[in-house]
Image (spheres, rainbow, N blue to C red):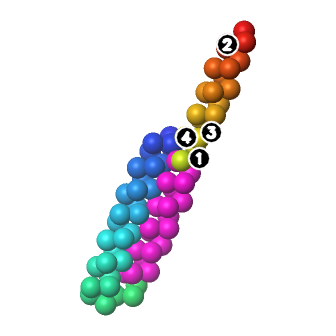
Amino acid sequence: MGSTTDKVAGMTNEAIGKAKQGIGKAVGSDQMQAEGLAQEAKGDAQRAVGEAKSAIKTGANKVADAVNKIL
């Protein structure tokens, strides 16, 4: 996946996870709260991967631009 796709998937999982936690709390379901917490954590990780990919791409582009200026 690309960095944008990872970021969007991460934010989606975070939002769904938070919603599940809220619903679980409202209906008294510890299982749903736990699932929500796990999904939110998965989303955090996905978003972090997307951010890292974006940072690496930006750094590589800066290096390529510097090399091209020298050539």
Left or right: residue 55 compared with residue 34: right
In magenta, the rendered stretch is: 32-50
Q: Residues within 10 Å of mark 3 (few under 14, many from 20)?
A: few
Q: How crowded is mark 4: few (under 14 residues within 10 Å), some or many (20 or more)?
A: some
Discs 2/1, front: 2
Q: Name the residue under label 3.
A: 56
- Contact, mark 4 vs mark 3 (Cβ under 8 Å): yes
Q: Mark 1 points at which residue?
A: 52
Q: Mark 3 vs mark 2: which is more N-terminal? A: 3
Relative vertical location of residue 3 with respect to residue 19 in this rendering, above or below: above
Q: Measure the C-alpha gap from mark 4 to mark 3.
A: 5 Å
Q: Mark 1 falls on what kind of element?
A: helix
Q: Mark 4 falls on what kind of element?
A: helix
- Residue 42 position in % (x across, y down): 50, 64
Q: Residues within 10 Å of mark 2 (few under 14, many from 20)?
A: few
- Contact, mark 4 vs mark 1 (Cβ under 8 Å): yes
Q: Is the magenta stretch mostly helix, strand or loop?
A: helix
Residue 66 position by quadrant: top right
Q: Mark 3 falls on what kind of element?
A: helix
Q: Determine which of the numbered discs, if any, sits on residue 54 in the image.
A: 4
At a point 37% along the width and 81% down the height, the residue shown is 32
Q: Mark 2 falls on what kind of element?
A: helix
Q: Name the residue under label 2.
A: 69
At a point 45% along the width and 75% down the height, the residue shown is 37
- Report the amino acid beneath label 1: Ala
Left or right: residue 50 compared with residue 24: right
- Contact, mark 2 vs mark 1 (Cβ under 8 Å): no
